[in-house]
Image (cartoon, grey):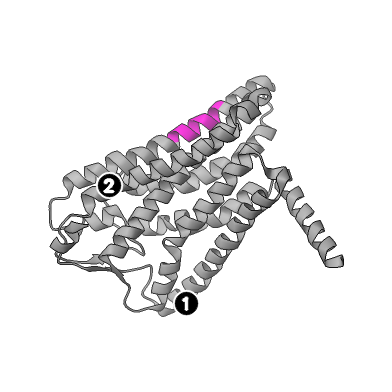
């Protein structure tokens, strides 16, 4: 980080979501409740999958990793957003801003790969049920997770390497509640066109291509099921609807910000509430409400707790 010494700006001011005190109190209550739900819901799924041997299958292994990533992704922004709503001066140091950007993109990259892995898992389970356990073996599942982390790190660092050495000499106000490449680049004292192209070529292409790959894969699965079941898609659609909802919620803000940079309005910061707060808190519900295995595991856990208490 030698480039830090060349920057006049040593901190940024996050303008946040609102300046009205009444609105701030409302947002603090809402986001505190949401963040508590994110932590409790996702960690419950994570530990349920670990400790219940009946859930030791590829689908739930990937779901447990997704839950952990959701906790990490929301934790990079939501706690500071809540803290900033309480403070008049919403300051973040240059180093902390770069660190936040780095973790956001690492976690985002991991989540994209996990969503691809979960789509592949559903394709295998629905279209190749007899070969499911051979294809989705433990080695493949672990490889998906490792590939996600490698992809996330490369994705983040390949952009951070260009941005971190840019000269920042003012202004230093970021019209958002978190740091990210598009907003920060606009504050650099240099021509940002080539850096905007880097963001579009990296984050934009990654978001757009992954989104269409996932949507096409789910359409492909539904077409195969439709052909095999003489038009009855109800069971497959119920299974895949949760995945499709998560994909749409996660990728819509990403494509809005990274495919068509760079923001001229504040709408993107409100859209990204979906990625940092709404999607992580909904994921446990979306993936469990219609999932018989999870419901049975929760009942089994309840019975064990009742038995231990009785004893």
Q: Is residue 291 visible?
A: no
Image quadrant containing the N terminus: bottom left
Residue ID at (45%, 67%): 79
Residue 104 is a magenta residue? no
Q: Is residue 131 left or right of residue 202?
A: right
Q: Is residue 252 left or right of residue 282?
A: left
Of circles 2 and 1, the one toward us is 2
Where's residue 27, x and y in %? 47, 71
Name the element at disc 2: helix
Residue 278 rendering spot, x and y as whole percentages: 51, 57
Q: CA distance from mark 2 to mark 1?
A: 36 Å
As drawn, is 244 to the left or to the right of 113? right
Q: Residues within 10 Å of mark 1 (few under 14, many from 20)?
A: few
Image quarter (top left, top right, bottom left or bottom right) of the C terminus: bottom right
- The residue tagged 1 is 25
In the drawing, what numbered circle is on residue 159?
Answer: 2
What residue is at 35 percent from the left and 62 percent from the top? 178
Q: Is residue 211 above or below residue 301?
A: above
For image coordinates 67% across by 20% down, the residue present is 228
Q: Earlier in the sequence, mark 2 or mark 1?
A: 1
Main secondary structure found in the magenta portion: helix
Query: What residue lies at 49% left-to-right and 59% top-to-bottom?
Result: 277
- Could you say where residue 194 lies in the image, as x and y percent from the top left? 18, 44
Q: Which residues are magenta?
A: 212-220
- Indicate the position of residue 199 as horizontal and vertical percent values: 27, 45
């Amino acid at each position: 980080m030698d480039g830090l010494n060349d920057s006049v700006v040593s901190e940024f001011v996050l303008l946040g979501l609102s300046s009205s005190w009444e609105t701030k109190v409302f947002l603090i209550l809402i986001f505190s409740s949401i963040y508590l739900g994110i932590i409790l819901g996702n960690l419950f799924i994570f530990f349920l999958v670990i400790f219940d041997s009946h859930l030791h299958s590829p689908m739930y292994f990937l779901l447990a990793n997704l839950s952990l990533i959701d906790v990490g992704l929301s934790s990079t922004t939501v706690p500071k957003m809540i803290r900033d709503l309480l403070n008049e001066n919403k300051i973040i140091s240059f180093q902390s801003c770069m660190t936040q950007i780095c973790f956001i993109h690492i976690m985002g990259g991991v989540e994209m790969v996990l969503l691809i892995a979960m789509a592949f898992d559903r394709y295998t389970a629905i279209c190749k049920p007899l070969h499911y356990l051979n294809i989705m073996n433990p080695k493949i599942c672990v490889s998906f997770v490792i590939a996600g982390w490698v992809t996330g790190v490369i994705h983040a660092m390949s952009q951070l390497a260009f941005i971190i050495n840019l000269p920042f000499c003012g202004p230093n106000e970021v019209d958002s509640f978190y740091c990210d490449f598009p907003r920060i680049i606009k504050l650099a004292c240099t021509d940002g066109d080539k850096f905007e192209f880097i963001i579009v070529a990296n984050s934009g292409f990654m978001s757009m291509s992954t989104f269409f790959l996932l949507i096409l894969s789910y359409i492909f699965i539904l077409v195969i099921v439709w052909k095999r079941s003489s038009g009855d898609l109800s069971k497959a659609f119920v299974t895949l609807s949760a995945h499709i909802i998560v994909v749409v919620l996660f990728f819509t803000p990403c494509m809005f910000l990274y495919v068509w940079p760079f923001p001229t309005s504040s709408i993107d910061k409100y859209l990204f509430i979906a990625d940092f707060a709404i999607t992580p808190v909904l994921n446990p519900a979306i993936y469990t409400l219609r999932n018989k295995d999870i419901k049975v595991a929760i009942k089994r856990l309840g019975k064990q707790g009742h038995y231990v208490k009785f004893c």
